[in-house]
């Protein structure tokens, strides 16, 4: 093959190059699931998101009506299950009314180091609650030093905060207790500033309630 023939064959290959059209890809609004997920944001805050299928909610509303009850609100209920051994021991700590198709929520729990679950469902005018979905269980971490430690690197909590203060954290001469309290106030103030009303705020999930 001569150089001119080689060049010609290259040109032919270039002409046959398959230029595929670009396609648009979109993240779907939902995945046709019926579930609620609970996550830890920090020692004092949980985050939950959910997806409820329309036919599941419609079916539950029919069940409520067949029982002679009147559906009232869509709710997110939060349970402290730290010491709960069964469903009979569940005690709702918080309940939040869901409006404007909310499908996620930040929850300020106040107490760190506890186990939690959440449920999304429908309440009735009689106070009865019907569950659409229940979440997984999460355990909020403790704030401060862990109680689990390696003997080789053992350090008391008081010594830890004294070293933190001496390193310039909050001023030399500050007691370990003052440093710990100041840090906790600082972290909570940063986490909850400008976003929460009464420690809780939500964002736009459930289908609008039938009138």
Image: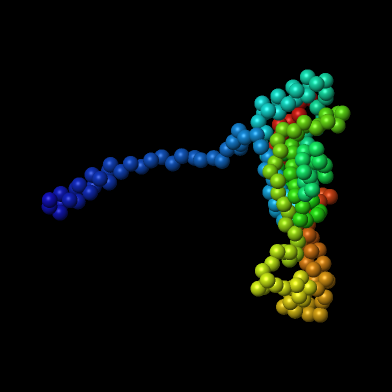
The quarter of the picture where the C terminus appears is top right
Residue at 65% x, 34% y is 34
Between 202 and 143, the residue placed more toward the observer is: 143
* Residue 186 spot, x, y in % from top left: 78, 64
Q: Toward which corner of the image does residue 182 lie, by quadrant?
A: bottom right
Q: How many labels, in total?
A: 0
User: Is 114 placed above or below 76 here?
Assistant: below
Residue farthest along the left direction in this orientation: 2
Residue at 76% x, 70% y is 157
* Residue 140 spot, x, y in % from top left: 73, 54
User: Is 78 placed above or below 32 here?
Assistant: below
* Residue 10 spot, x, y in % from top left: 22, 49
* Residue 88 spot, x, y in % from top left: 80, 38
Residue at 70% x, 72% y is 154
User: Is 98 placed above or below 176 here?
Assistant: above
Query: Is residue 83 something that shows in the picture?
Result: yes
Residue at 87% x, 28% y is 126
Q: Toward which corner of the image does residue 141 lie, by quadrant?
A: bottom right
By what rule are the colours in the image chosen? rainbow
Between 124 and 99, the residue placed more toward the observer is: 124
Query: Is residue 202 something that shows in the picture?
Result: no
């Amino acid at each position: 093959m001569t150089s001119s023939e080689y060049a010609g064959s290259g040109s032919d290959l270039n002409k046959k190059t398959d230029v595929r059209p670009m396609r648009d890809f979109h993240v779907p609004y939902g995945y046709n699931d019926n579930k609620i997920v609970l996550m830890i944001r920090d020692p004092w805050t949980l985050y939950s998101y959910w997806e409820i299928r329309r036919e599941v909610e419609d079916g539950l509303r029919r069940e409520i009506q067949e029982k002679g009850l009147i559906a009232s609100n869509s709710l997110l209920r939060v349970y402290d299950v730290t010491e709960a051994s069964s469903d009979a021991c569940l005690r709702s700590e918080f309940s939040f009314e869901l409006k404007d198709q909310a499908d996620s929520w930040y929850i300020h729990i106040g107490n760190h180091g506890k186990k939690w679950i959440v449920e999304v469902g429908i309440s009735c005018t009689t106070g009865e609650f019907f569950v659409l979905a229940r979440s997984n269980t999460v355990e909020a971490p403790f704030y401060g030093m862990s109680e689990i430690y390696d003997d080789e690197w053992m350090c008391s909590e008081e010594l830890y905060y004294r070293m933190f203060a001496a390193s310039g954290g909050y001023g030399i001469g500050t007691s370990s207790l003052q440093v710990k309290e100041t840090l906790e106030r600082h972290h909570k103030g940063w986490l909850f500033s400008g976003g929460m009303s009464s420690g809780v705020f939500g964002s736009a999930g459930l289908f609008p309630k039938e009138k």
